[in-house]
Image (spheres, helix red, strand yellow):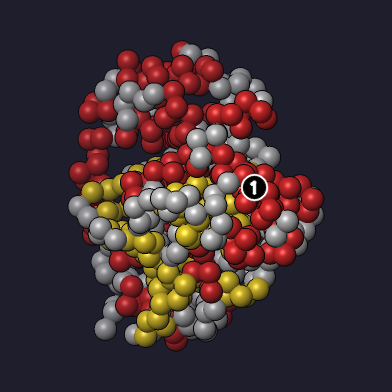
């Protein structure tokens, strides 16, 4: 039987924190600023968009500690059990000597008002630990989730390129403490389930996957929290009470990726960042798309499983996975079942999930030889923005030029992520020609009746969806450059 512990334990910089009075809705940023008086991390947006509150969170992965940049404004304190939190206050030496990242920002004039600077520093520190000599695209990717309203980004990018001239990562003042920190983190991860509080104040942090399955079957009314990139906003923007809550982000079995020659399986706790190598390796067409899912901090926190389980009609990954023919693994206690992902979404806010049942994994078949695949994200802002619509297209054209199979799926076009089955039927069995595409365009109104909202009008969504089919045809028939010139 799993041991029960009634406290949240983690390391904050070099101090061990042991909390027995945490609430399910308590955010890390509030804890840092109000309780610990660590005010370097700022609140700019309270929804994970601006990056002013960025900190690093380290967690055990095998025998190593992996540090991710995250936004403290929507990171729940209860999710930090067994982790190491590093804030900007921990970077400078005790004698006041600035860390190489900080000194580079000073010397290259990367700050004016300074409000956003601590967040930039922490994002750049996380990048520098992984890549001491990053390219400009790597820097831009690492900073997608950090907004500056004063300097523009050129001096910050220059600072990022100069960090290693102030010292190598091997000489990082914080590197020396990593061995000791790892030992302390390993001691905190004692294999116990955290379980305390009552009613809506109850917090559960399962120790293992089996422990989670048993706990959730016994308390199906609990809110499952993985990356908190959506649930966090329910608290900060809508003041919702999410308790009782189960925080599953650090359940090791849920962070697995299994690959073979026929499929890729992502378990539900795998973050977007963790999933990227496997997904882009199996589907190179996803490289650009994957890097446009939110910003770096959100990709480090958010999970593919959570994006599916949440059931949002504008989630980025469901249309892609539906087009790829993904299957969903669901679990309740010891019972498991598998369904097609497209069948999971029943209606707005309603999924095929029983009380006490949760998404355990998603399995994506690799593309058969000869099939073509593409995905397009349409948003007001290129980086770190929610889709107005997202379309995924998959097709097989035989040697005679006839379409033998077509799968088209969209998000943002209906109350759920949904296939365009009428459009597919209008294509299959026909020559893969522009004439076939133009004839199929009218069928979109049979599949979708999009709404108008702040992101796009219904007319815009429908027109763009039709044009994306034209674009897919042009790109798969060698006419993509001609199309680009035509719309330029």
Q: Where residue 232 sits: x, y (%)?
A: 58, 58
Residue 431 relative to residue 192: left or right: right
Residue 335 lies in quadrant: bottom left
Q: Which residue is drawn at 40% across and 19% down?
A: 161
Residue 462 relative to residue 409: left or right: right
Q: Where residue 14 sits: x, y (%)?
A: 33, 44
Considering depth in this image, is 31 or 287 the residue closer to the camera?
A: 287
Which residue corresponds to mark 1?
435
Residue 215 lies in quadrant: bottom left
Q: Does any portion of residue 47 appear in the rendered image?
A: no
Considering depth in this image, is 275 or 112 the residue closer to the camera?
A: 275
Judge whether 369 appears above or below 42 on screen.
below
Q: Does any portion of residue 137 appear in the rendered image?
A: yes
Judge whether 485 appears above or below 338 on screen.
above
Judge whether 126 appears above or below 351 on screen.
above
Q: Residue at x 48, y 39 (%)?
A: 288
Classify the position of the N terminus by image quarter. bottom left
Q: Where residue 171 sits: x, y (%)?
A: 24, 26
Q: Residue at x 68, y 64 (%)?
A: 447
Residue 425 relative to residue 101: left or right: right
Residue 245 relative to residue 278: left or right: right
Q: Residue at x 38, y 50 (%)?
A: 370
């Amino acid at each position: 039987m799993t041991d029960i512990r009634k406290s949240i334990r983690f390391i904050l910089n070099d101090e061990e924190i042991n909390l027995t009075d945490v609430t399910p809705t308590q955010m890390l940023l509030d804890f840092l600023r109000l309780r610990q008086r660590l005010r370097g991390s700022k609140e700019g947006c309270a929804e994970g968009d601006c990056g002013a509150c960025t900190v690093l969170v380290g967690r055990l992965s095998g025998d190593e500690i992996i540090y991710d940049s995250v936004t403290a404004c929507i990171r729940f304190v209860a999710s930090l059990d067994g982790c190491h939190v590093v804030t900007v206050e921990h970077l400078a030496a005790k004698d006041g000597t600035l860390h190489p990242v900080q000194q580079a920002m000073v010397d290259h004039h990367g700050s004016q008002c300074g409000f956003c600077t601590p967040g930039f520093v922490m994002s750049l520190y996380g990048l520098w630990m992984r890549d001491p000599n990053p390219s400009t695209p790597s820097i831009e990717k690492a900073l997608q989730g950090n907004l500056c309203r004063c300097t523009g980004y050129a001096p910050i990018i220059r600072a990022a390129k100069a960090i290693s001239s102030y010292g190598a990562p091997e000489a990082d003042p914080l590197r020396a403490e990593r061995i000791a920190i790892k030992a302390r983190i390993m001691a905190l991860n004692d294999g116990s389930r955290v379980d305390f509080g009552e009613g809506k104040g109850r917090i559960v942090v399962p120790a293992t996957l089996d422990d989670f399955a048993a706990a959730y079957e016994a308390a199906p009314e609990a809110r499952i929290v993985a990356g908190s990139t959506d649930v966090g906003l329910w608290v900060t923007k809508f003041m919702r009470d999410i308790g009782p809550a189960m925080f599953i982000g650090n359940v090791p079995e849920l962070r697995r990726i299994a690959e073979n020659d026929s499929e890729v399986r992502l378990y539900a706790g795998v973050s977007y960042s963790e999933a990227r190598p496997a997904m882009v390796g199996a589907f190179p067409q996803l490289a650009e798309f994957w890097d446009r899912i939110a910003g770096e901090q959100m990709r480090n926190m958010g999970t593919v499983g959570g994006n599916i389980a949440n059931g949002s009609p504008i989630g980025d990954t469901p249309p892609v996975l539906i087009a790829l023919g993904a299957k969903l693994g669901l679990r309740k206690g010891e019972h498991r079942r598998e369904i097609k992902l497209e069948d999971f979404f029943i209606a707005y806010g309603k999924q095929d999930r029983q009380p006490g049942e949760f998404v355990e994994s998603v399995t994506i078949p690799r593309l058969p030889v000869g099939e073509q695949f593409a995905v397009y994200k349409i948003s007001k802002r290129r980086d770190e923005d929610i889709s107005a619509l997202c379309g995924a297209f998959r097709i097989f054209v035989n040697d005679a030029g006839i379409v033998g199979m077509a799968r088209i799926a969209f998000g943002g076009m209906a109350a759920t992520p949904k296939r365009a089955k009428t459009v597919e039927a209008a294509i299959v069995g026909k020559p893969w020609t522009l004439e076939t595409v133009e004839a199929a365009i009218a069928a979109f109104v049979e599949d979708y009746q999009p709404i108008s909202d702040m992101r796009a009008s219904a007319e815009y969504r429908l027109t763009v969806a039709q044009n994306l089919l034209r674009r897919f045809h042009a790109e798969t028939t060698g006419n993509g450059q001609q199309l680009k010139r035509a719309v330029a």
